[in-house]
Amino acid sequence: MIDKRFAFEQLPDWVEDQVIAWRRYLHQHPELSFHEHETAAFVENTLREMEGLTISRPTPTSVVAVLKGDQLGPVIAFRADMDALPIHEENTFDFVSSTPGVMHACGHDGHTAMLLAAAKLLTEKRDYLRGEIRFIFQHAEELPPGGAIELVEAGVMDGVDYVFGVHLASLLPVGQIGIRHGEMMASPDNFTIVIKGYGGHAGYPHRAVDVITVGTQLVGHLQHIVSRLTDPLERLVVSVTQFTAGSSHNVIPHSATLKGTVRSFKPSVRQEVPEIIRKMSEGIAALYGATVEVNFVYGYEPVINDEWLTNLVHEAAVEVVGADLVIATPPGMGGEDFSAYQQRVRGTFVNIGAGNEAEGIIFPHHHPKFTIDESSLLTGVKLFLQVADKLLTTKS
Ligand code: NI
Protein backbone atom coordinates (compact mmCIF):
# COMPACT_ATOMS: atom_id res chain seq x y z
CA MET A 1 0.00 0.00 0.00
CA ILE A 2 1.27 3.43 -0.87
CA ASP A 3 1.51 5.75 2.12
CA LYS A 4 -0.27 8.89 1.01
CA ARG A 5 -0.12 10.57 4.37
CA PHE A 6 2.20 13.50 5.01
CA ALA A 7 2.36 12.77 8.70
CA PHE A 8 4.92 10.38 10.14
CA GLU A 9 4.80 8.53 13.41
CA GLN A 10 8.55 8.22 13.10
CA LEU A 11 10.30 10.78 10.92
CA PRO A 12 12.83 9.42 8.39
CA ASP A 13 16.32 9.05 9.86
CA TRP A 14 17.90 11.95 8.01
CA VAL A 15 15.56 14.53 9.51
CA GLU A 16 17.00 14.79 13.00
CA ASP A 17 20.61 15.35 11.95
CA GLN A 18 19.61 17.65 9.12
CA VAL A 19 17.27 19.91 11.07
CA ILE A 20 19.84 20.25 13.87
CA ALA A 21 22.61 21.00 11.36
CA TRP A 22 20.50 23.71 9.71
CA ARG A 23 19.61 25.21 13.08
CA ARG A 24 23.23 25.25 14.20
CA TYR A 25 24.43 26.83 10.97
CA LEU A 26 21.81 29.57 11.32
CA HIS A 27 22.60 29.98 15.01
CA GLN A 28 26.23 30.57 14.15
CA HIS A 29 25.35 33.13 11.47
CA PRO A 30 22.72 35.43 12.96
CA GLU A 31 21.58 38.61 11.19
CA LEU A 32 19.55 41.53 12.46
CA SER A 33 16.05 42.42 11.30
CA PHE A 34 15.88 43.68 7.69
CA HIS A 35 19.53 42.58 7.21
CA GLU A 36 18.97 38.82 6.77
CA HIS A 37 20.84 38.70 3.43
CA GLU A 38 23.01 35.64 4.08
CA THR A 39 20.18 33.89 5.90
CA ALA A 40 17.77 34.42 3.02
CA ALA A 41 20.41 33.25 0.52
CA PHE A 42 21.01 30.12 2.62
CA VAL A 43 17.29 29.40 2.79
CA GLU A 44 16.81 30.00 -0.93
CA ASN A 45 19.76 27.75 -1.86
CA THR A 46 18.53 25.00 0.45
CA LEU A 47 15.02 25.19 -1.05
CA ARG A 48 16.45 25.09 -4.58
CA GLU A 49 17.78 21.60 -3.85
CA MET A 50 14.21 20.41 -3.26
CA GLU A 51 11.99 19.44 -6.17
CA GLY A 52 8.71 21.01 -7.19
CA LEU A 53 8.98 24.36 -5.46
CA THR A 54 8.41 27.76 -7.05
CA ILE A 55 10.68 30.14 -5.18
CA SER A 56 10.45 33.91 -4.97
CA ARG A 57 11.94 36.78 -2.99
CA PRO A 58 9.07 39.17 -2.19
CA THR A 59 11.45 41.53 -0.32
CA PRO A 60 15.26 41.67 -0.31
CA THR A 61 15.62 39.41 2.77
CA SER A 62 12.58 37.12 2.68
CA VAL A 63 11.91 33.91 0.76
CA VAL A 64 8.64 32.28 -0.25
CA ALA A 65 8.40 28.78 -1.73
CA VAL A 66 5.18 27.45 -3.22
CA LEU A 67 4.31 23.76 -3.50
CA LYS A 68 1.23 23.01 -5.62
CA GLY A 69 -0.76 19.81 -5.86
CA ASP A 70 -2.44 18.66 -9.07
CA GLN A 71 -5.88 18.68 -7.51
CA LEU A 72 -7.77 21.68 -6.24
CA GLY A 73 -7.77 22.22 -2.54
CA PRO A 74 -7.14 24.78 0.16
CA VAL A 75 -4.15 27.09 0.19
CA ILE A 76 -2.25 27.06 3.45
CA ALA A 77 0.68 29.24 4.45
CA PHE A 78 3.31 28.02 6.91
CA ARG A 79 5.41 30.79 8.39
CA ALA A 80 8.87 30.87 9.97
CA ASP A 81 10.71 34.04 11.02
CA MET A 82 14.46 34.30 10.44
CA ASP A 83 15.89 37.36 12.22
CA ALA A 84 18.21 37.58 15.23
CA LEU A 85 18.63 40.15 18.01
CA PRO A 86 21.22 42.77 19.03
CA ILE A 87 22.39 40.68 22.02
CA HIS A 88 25.91 39.44 22.73
CA GLU A 89 25.73 35.68 23.18
CA GLU A 90 27.03 34.17 26.42
CA ASN A 91 26.57 30.51 25.55
CA THR A 92 29.69 28.37 25.28
CA PHE A 93 28.74 25.56 22.90
CA ASP A 94 30.74 25.20 19.70
CA PHE A 95 28.18 26.79 17.39
CA VAL A 96 27.77 30.11 19.20
CA SER A 97 27.22 33.26 17.18
CA SER A 98 30.19 34.20 15.04
CA THR A 99 29.01 37.82 14.96
CA PRO A 100 29.74 39.74 18.16
CA GLY A 101 26.67 41.52 19.51
CA VAL A 102 24.18 39.60 17.35
CA MET A 103 22.45 36.45 18.51
CA HIS A 104 19.58 34.12 17.75
CA ALA A 105 18.12 34.58 21.22
CA CYS A 106 14.49 33.94 20.36
CA GLY A 107 14.65 30.61 18.52
CA HIS A 108 14.05 31.94 15.01
CA ASP A 109 17.02 29.82 13.85
CA GLY A 110 14.99 26.80 14.95
CA HIS A 111 11.82 28.07 13.26
CA THR A 112 13.64 28.38 9.94
CA ALA A 113 15.28 24.95 10.27
CA MET A 114 11.95 23.28 11.11
CA LEU A 115 10.17 24.82 8.15
CA LEU A 116 12.99 23.81 5.79
CA ALA A 117 12.68 20.22 7.00
CA ALA A 118 8.89 20.30 6.64
CA ALA A 119 9.28 21.68 3.10
CA LYS A 120 11.67 18.88 2.16
CA LEU A 121 9.41 16.17 3.53
CA LEU A 122 6.33 17.62 1.86
CA THR A 123 8.01 18.06 -1.53
CA GLU A 124 8.92 14.38 -1.42
CA LYS A 125 5.22 13.53 -1.18
CA ARG A 126 3.87 16.20 -3.50
CA ASP A 127 2.06 13.60 -5.63
CA TYR A 128 -0.49 13.23 -2.86
CA LEU A 129 -0.97 16.93 -2.32
CA ARG A 130 -4.12 18.80 -3.20
CA GLY A 131 -4.27 22.55 -2.99
CA GLU A 132 -1.17 24.53 -2.22
CA ILE A 133 1.35 25.13 0.54
CA ARG A 134 3.24 28.41 0.80
CA PHE A 135 6.37 28.25 2.90
CA ILE A 136 6.99 31.77 4.14
CA PHE A 137 10.46 32.54 5.45
CA GLN A 138 9.90 35.96 6.94
CA HIS A 139 12.43 38.64 7.78
CA ALA A 140 12.29 41.16 10.62
CA GLU A 141 9.84 39.86 13.17
CA GLU A 142 11.71 41.63 15.97
CA LEU A 143 11.67 45.18 14.65
CA PRO A 144 8.51 47.21 13.98
CA PRO A 145 6.95 47.78 11.53
CA GLY A 146 8.03 44.13 11.00
CA GLY A 147 8.47 41.93 7.99
CA ALA A 148 5.01 40.35 8.03
CA ILE A 149 3.20 43.52 7.01
CA GLU A 150 5.64 43.98 4.11
CA LEU A 151 4.98 40.44 2.94
CA VAL A 152 1.23 40.92 3.20
CA GLU A 153 1.58 44.09 1.12
CA ALA A 154 3.69 42.12 -1.39
CA GLY A 155 0.73 39.77 -1.83
CA VAL A 156 1.92 36.60 -0.11
CA MET A 157 -1.47 36.13 1.58
CA ASP A 158 -3.47 36.64 -1.64
CA GLY A 159 -5.55 33.52 -2.19
CA VAL A 160 -4.46 31.94 1.09
CA ASP A 161 -7.14 30.20 3.17
CA TYR A 162 -5.22 29.50 6.37
CA VAL A 163 -1.96 30.60 7.94
CA PHE A 164 -0.15 28.60 10.58
CA GLY A 165 2.97 29.45 12.57
CA VAL A 166 4.90 28.11 15.55
CA HIS A 167 7.20 29.60 18.15
CA LEU A 168 9.72 27.61 20.15
CA ALA A 169 9.28 28.40 23.85
CA SER A 170 12.16 27.88 26.27
CA LEU A 171 9.93 28.24 29.31
CA LEU A 172 7.66 25.42 28.13
CA PRO A 173 9.14 21.93 28.69
CA VAL A 174 10.35 20.14 25.58
CA GLY A 175 7.81 17.61 24.29
CA GLN A 176 4.85 19.84 25.07
CA ILE A 177 2.80 21.89 22.64
CA GLY A 178 1.01 24.99 23.89
CA ILE A 179 -2.28 25.87 22.22
CA ARG A 180 -4.24 29.05 22.75
CA HIS A 181 -7.79 29.72 21.63
CA GLY A 182 -8.56 33.37 20.94
CA GLU A 183 -6.41 36.17 22.38
CA MET A 184 -2.80 34.98 22.52
CA MET A 185 -0.38 37.91 22.27
CA ALA A 186 -0.99 41.60 22.85
CA SER A 187 -0.51 44.58 20.58
CA PRO A 188 2.70 46.32 21.66
CA ASP A 189 2.15 50.07 21.27
CA ASN A 190 4.76 52.66 22.28
CA PHE A 191 4.58 56.17 23.70
CA THR A 192 7.09 58.97 24.19
CA ILE A 193 6.36 61.95 26.43
CA VAL A 194 8.66 64.97 26.29
CA ILE A 195 8.17 67.31 29.27
CA LYS A 196 9.33 70.86 28.82
CA GLY A 197 9.87 73.05 31.87
CA TYR A 198 12.17 75.91 32.73
CA GLY A 199 15.70 75.04 33.69
CA GLY A 200 17.43 76.68 36.57
CA HIS A 201 19.58 76.58 39.69
CA ALA A 202 18.83 73.68 42.03
CA GLY A 203 19.11 76.01 45.01
CA TYR A 204 16.27 78.19 43.67
CA PRO A 205 13.59 75.71 42.54
CA HIS A 206 10.82 78.30 42.76
CA ARG A 207 12.40 80.13 39.83
CA ALA A 208 12.43 76.98 37.68
CA VAL A 209 9.78 74.61 36.36
CA ASP A 210 11.12 71.24 37.47
CA VAL A 211 10.54 68.57 34.85
CA ILE A 212 11.78 65.79 37.12
CA THR A 213 9.02 66.50 39.64
CA VAL A 214 6.47 66.59 36.82
CA GLY A 215 7.86 63.36 35.37
CA THR A 216 7.76 61.45 38.65
CA GLN A 217 4.18 62.59 39.29
CA LEU A 218 3.28 61.44 35.83
CA VAL A 219 4.89 57.99 36.25
CA GLY A 220 2.79 57.52 39.39
CA HIS A 221 -0.41 58.64 37.72
CA LEU A 222 0.09 56.44 34.66
CA GLN A 223 -0.28 53.42 36.96
CA HIS A 224 -3.89 54.48 37.50
CA ILE A 225 -4.79 53.83 33.86
CA VAL A 226 -4.93 50.11 34.53
CA SER A 227 -6.13 50.24 38.13
CA ARG A 228 -8.74 53.06 37.95
CA LEU A 229 -9.50 54.27 34.46
CA THR A 230 -10.11 51.23 32.26
CA ASP A 231 -12.26 48.11 32.47
CA PRO A 232 -10.65 45.70 34.94
CA LEU A 233 -11.82 42.76 32.82
CA GLU A 234 -9.67 43.84 29.88
CA ARG A 235 -6.07 42.72 29.59
CA LEU A 236 -3.90 45.82 29.68
CA VAL A 237 -0.35 46.79 30.68
CA VAL A 238 1.10 50.30 30.86
CA SER A 239 4.85 50.31 31.57
CA VAL A 240 7.21 53.28 31.73
CA THR A 241 10.54 51.89 30.61
CA GLN A 242 12.76 54.93 30.22
CA PHE A 243 13.08 58.25 32.10
CA THR A 244 15.82 60.57 30.91
CA ALA A 245 16.56 63.94 32.48
CA GLY A 246 19.31 66.01 34.00
CA SER A 247 23.07 66.04 33.95
CA SER A 248 24.33 67.38 37.27
CA HIS A 249 23.74 67.85 41.01
CA ASN A 250 22.97 71.53 40.92
CA VAL A 251 20.94 72.05 37.75
CA ILE A 252 17.19 71.65 37.39
CA PRO A 253 16.94 70.34 33.83
CA HIS A 254 14.96 72.07 31.13
CA SER A 255 13.37 68.96 29.68
CA ALA A 256 12.75 65.29 30.44
CA THR A 257 11.70 62.33 28.32
CA LEU A 258 9.57 59.37 29.35
CA LYS A 259 9.18 56.33 27.15
CA GLY A 260 7.04 53.28 27.61
CA THR A 261 4.74 50.67 26.17
CA VAL A 262 1.04 49.86 26.25
CA ARG A 263 -0.03 46.23 25.77
CA SER A 264 -3.65 45.35 25.09
CA PHE A 265 -5.96 43.25 22.90
CA LYS A 266 -9.21 45.09 22.16
CA PRO A 267 -9.44 47.88 19.57
CA SER A 268 -11.55 49.94 22.00
CA VAL A 269 -8.86 49.77 24.69
CA ARG A 270 -6.18 50.53 22.14
CA GLN A 271 -8.01 53.70 21.17
CA GLU A 272 -8.88 54.75 24.70
CA VAL A 273 -5.44 54.58 26.34
CA PRO A 274 -3.49 57.08 24.19
CA GLU A 275 -6.14 59.70 24.89
CA ILE A 276 -5.89 59.09 28.65
CA ILE A 277 -2.10 59.33 28.50
CA ARG A 278 -2.36 62.59 26.61
CA LYS A 279 -4.88 64.15 28.99
CA MET A 280 -3.00 63.00 32.06
CA SER A 281 0.31 64.33 30.76
CA GLU A 282 -1.15 67.71 29.83
CA GLY A 283 -3.04 68.02 33.12
CA ILE A 284 -0.10 67.21 35.36
CA ALA A 285 2.29 69.36 33.35
CA ALA A 286 -0.15 72.28 33.54
CA LEU A 287 -0.33 72.02 37.34
CA TYR A 288 3.37 72.87 37.51
CA GLY A 289 3.60 75.23 34.57
CA ALA A 290 5.28 72.74 32.23
CA THR A 291 4.19 71.64 28.77
CA VAL A 292 4.26 68.22 27.13
CA GLU A 293 4.49 66.61 23.73
CA VAL A 294 2.98 63.16 23.61
CA ASN A 295 3.74 60.83 20.74
CA PHE A 296 2.01 57.47 20.41
CA VAL A 297 3.04 54.81 17.89
CA TYR A 298 0.84 51.80 17.25
CA GLY A 299 2.76 48.53 16.92
CA TYR A 300 1.72 45.06 15.76
CA GLU A 301 -1.90 43.96 15.88
CA PRO A 302 -2.71 41.45 18.61
CA VAL A 303 -2.37 37.74 17.84
CA ILE A 304 -5.90 36.34 18.03
CA ASN A 305 -6.23 32.72 16.99
CA ASP A 306 -9.02 31.53 14.72
CA GLU A 307 -11.33 29.12 16.52
CA TRP A 308 -11.83 26.59 13.73
CA LEU A 309 -8.17 26.37 12.74
CA THR A 310 -7.07 26.25 16.38
CA ASN A 311 -9.33 23.26 16.93
CA LEU A 312 -7.81 21.54 13.92
CA VAL A 313 -4.25 22.29 15.06
CA HIS A 314 -5.18 21.16 18.56
CA GLU A 315 -6.22 17.77 17.14
CA ALA A 316 -3.01 17.62 15.13
CA ALA A 317 -0.96 18.41 18.25
CA VAL A 318 -2.69 15.63 20.20
CA GLU A 319 -1.83 13.24 17.38
CA VAL A 320 1.82 14.31 17.50
CA VAL A 321 2.57 14.34 21.25
CA GLY A 322 -0.52 12.87 22.93
CA ALA A 323 -3.26 14.66 24.85
CA ASP A 324 -1.27 14.84 28.09
CA LEU A 325 1.43 16.94 26.49
CA VAL A 326 -0.86 19.44 24.77
CA ILE A 327 -1.39 22.27 27.20
CA ALA A 328 -3.52 25.40 27.16
CA THR A 329 -1.09 28.29 26.79
CA PRO A 330 -2.15 31.38 28.74
CA PRO A 331 -2.27 34.65 26.81
CA GLY A 332 0.85 36.80 27.06
CA MET A 333 1.53 40.52 26.78
CA GLY A 334 4.43 40.14 24.35
CA GLY A 335 3.85 41.00 20.68
CA GLU A 336 4.27 39.09 17.39
CA ASP A 337 3.84 40.31 13.85
CA PHE A 338 2.25 36.98 12.86
CA SER A 339 -0.88 39.03 13.55
CA ALA A 340 -0.38 40.85 10.24
CA TYR A 341 -1.25 37.60 8.43
CA GLN A 342 -4.21 36.98 10.73
CA GLN A 343 -5.62 40.34 9.73
CA ARG A 344 -6.03 38.86 6.25
CA VAL A 345 -6.77 35.16 6.67
CA ARG A 346 -7.74 32.67 9.35
CA GLY A 347 -4.65 31.83 11.33
CA THR A 348 -3.32 30.21 14.44
CA PHE A 349 -0.03 30.41 16.25
CA VAL A 350 1.23 27.80 18.72
CA ASN A 351 4.11 27.31 21.13
CA ILE A 352 6.46 24.36 20.87
CA GLY A 353 8.10 23.46 24.19
CA ALA A 354 11.90 23.76 24.00
CA GLY A 355 12.98 24.07 27.65
CA ASN A 356 14.76 21.40 29.65
CA GLU A 357 15.53 22.13 33.29
CA ALA A 358 17.67 19.04 33.77
CA GLU A 359 19.89 20.19 30.90
CA GLY A 360 20.07 23.79 32.14
CA ILE A 361 17.95 25.04 29.23
CA ILE A 362 16.03 27.47 31.39
CA PHE A 363 16.80 30.95 30.11
CA PRO A 364 14.01 33.17 28.83
CA HIS A 365 13.79 34.49 25.30
CA HIS A 366 16.10 37.45 24.57
CA HIS A 367 18.51 36.35 27.35
CA PRO A 368 22.22 36.11 26.37
CA LYS A 369 22.17 32.43 27.42
CA PHE A 370 18.93 31.57 25.66
CA THR A 371 18.94 28.24 23.90
CA ILE A 372 16.61 25.36 23.03
CA ASP A 373 16.49 21.61 23.53
CA GLU A 374 16.98 20.59 19.91
CA SER A 375 14.60 17.65 20.14
CA SER A 376 11.88 20.33 20.11
CA LEU A 377 12.69 20.78 16.42
CA LEU A 378 11.32 17.33 15.64
CA THR A 379 8.07 18.14 17.43
CA GLY A 380 7.71 21.25 15.30
CA VAL A 381 8.43 19.44 12.04
CA LYS A 382 5.91 16.74 12.91
CA LEU A 383 3.29 19.32 13.72
CA PHE A 384 3.68 21.08 10.37
CA LEU A 385 3.26 17.71 8.62
CA GLN A 386 0.29 16.72 10.73
CA VAL A 387 -1.47 20.01 9.98
CA ALA A 388 -0.73 19.59 6.26
CA ASP A 389 -2.07 16.06 6.50
CA LYS A 390 -5.38 17.24 7.89
CA LEU A 391 -5.90 19.96 5.30
CA LEU A 392 -4.22 18.89 2.11
CA THR A 393 -4.01 15.16 1.46
CA THR A 394 -5.83 13.77 -1.55
CA LYS A 395 -8.86 11.85 -0.42
CA SER A 396 -8.68 9.03 -2.98
NI1 NI B 1 10.49 35.35 18.52
Image (spheres, helix red, strand yellow):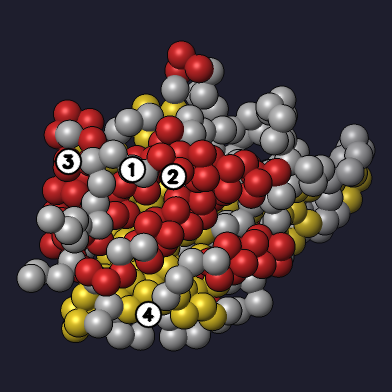
Judging from the image, what secondary structure is the residue with disc 2 in?
helix
Q: CA distance from mark 1 to mark 4?
A: 29 Å
Location of residue 32 by image quarter:
bottom right
| Residue furthest left as drawn | 396
Circles 3 and 1, Cβ within 8 Å, touching? The answer is no
Q: Mark 2 highlights which residue?
A: 15
Q: Is residue 325 left or right of residue 293?
A: left
Residue that mark 3 sits on:
318
- Quick one: label 1 or label 4, which is nearer the N terminus? 1
Q: Which label lies toward us, 1 or 4?
A: 1
Q: Is residue 198 visible?
A: yes
Q: Earlier in the sequence, mark 3 or mark 1?
A: 1
The residue sitting at the top extreme is 358
From mark 3 to mark 4, how far is it between C-alphas?
A: 28 Å
Residue identified by numbered label 1: 11
At x 73%, y 41%, the residue is: 97
Residue at 88%, 50% (x, y): give it: 200
Q: Position of residue 350 (x, y in %)?
A: 32, 49
Q: Earlier in the sequence, mark 4 or mark 2?
A: 2
Front tag of 4 and 2: 2
Marks 2 and 1, how far apart at CA: 7 Å
Answer left or right for 340 relative to 250.
left
Q: Answer yes or no: do the residues labelled 2 and 1 have beta carbons within 8 Å?
A: yes
119 over 364 or under it: above or below:
below
- Residue topped by disc 4: 157
Q: How far apart are the alpha carbons under marks 2 and 3?
A: 21 Å
**What's the amino acid at mark 1?**
Leu
Mark 2 Cα shell of 10 Å, populated few (<14), some (14-19), many (≥20): some
**In front: 329, or 118?**
118
**Relative to 56, residue 99 above or below:** above
